[in-house]
Amino acid sequence: MLNWNDLKYCLALDRHGFMVDAGKSLKVNVATVSRRIERITKDVGQTLFVRNGQYWEATVMGAELVTLAREVDARLPLITFDHTEELASDAVIKLSVSLTIMQTFMKNIASYRGGKHTPLNVDLTIYDRSLAYSETDVAVRYTRPQHGNYVCAKASSLNVCPYISSHSESWPTDWLEIDYDGVSIQPKDYGFDMPCIPKLRIEGLNLAAQSIGHGNYMGFFPTEFGDRNPDLRRATNGEPCQRLDIWMVYHKTRQLDPVVRAGVEMIQQCFTSTTPT
């Protein structure tokens, strides 16, 4: 049975790509990394990493274990969190949250600011500020860093589908693009014959929904938002939605910081206790 001691070797090799660097990060030699990966592969019964020159890349199964390892790595500090530790009354948690995530899962974040172990003061922005330079403490995004010393934990996911105006009698010939941190979603992904370039690009769900009606466009909205908006209706019936994973990211050097840990706890409350609106 796999445990954290196994998973951390998979995570280190995926992060660094080279066994030498993975060994340095774990303070073990290359032979130890090689043996552990070989043993884990044998236990799982599937190839986890393939070598391209000296670089190692995760297979589909390896990527699943790495994702699990990231989530365990992100939550280990919370498991050992000292709940007797009081935060200063002037403690501030700086959060950088994508606008569309704010408008679905985290709209009522103020409801979770008064807990005993939650910072009373929140500095919240929808802009992508630097984690490395402490411009923000925790980021909540659709994308996670592929490089750097970061802890990435999957917080939730959104299902995104094409929508059109519920009031329009004609089929739209153009579409608008909603910003999901650069994640590409296009009409051709759903078989619609529309231009590759969107007629309009918008940040935020509310303005995009208004524009759908005024301009008779197609747009791609989270089902949690689109299905509840009377001005929108799905453009497809029964077609699978595109799932966008939501990641909670903070710098690994900050994972023992009580403010960051309390902020992570607060964000997790938003995703487990708040119904998307």
Image (cartoon, grey):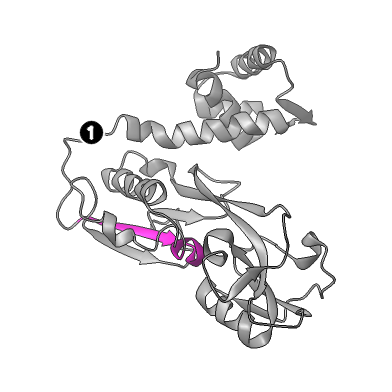
| Relative depth, front residue between 101 and 78 | 101
> Going 74% across and 65% down the picture, which residue do you hit?
186
Left of 173 or right of it: where is 156? Answer: left
As rendered, which of 132 and 82 lies closer to the eye? 82
Percent from the top left, x then y, of residue 107?
39, 63
The residue at the point 61 percent across, 19 percent down is 33
Instruction: Residue at 72% x, 83% y: name it.
Output: 169
Quadrant of the rendering where the C terminus is positioned: bottom left
Which amino acid does the dot numbered 1 rest on?
Asp
Q: To which quarter of the image does residue 275 belong?
A: bottom left
Query: Could you tell me if residue 21 is visible in this image?
Result: no
Q: Is residue 275 left or right of residue 179?
A: left
Secondary structure under tag 1 reads loop
Q: Position of residue 47 (x, y in %)?
A: 74, 22
Specify the farthest residue to the bottom: 214
Say which residue label 1 marks: 82
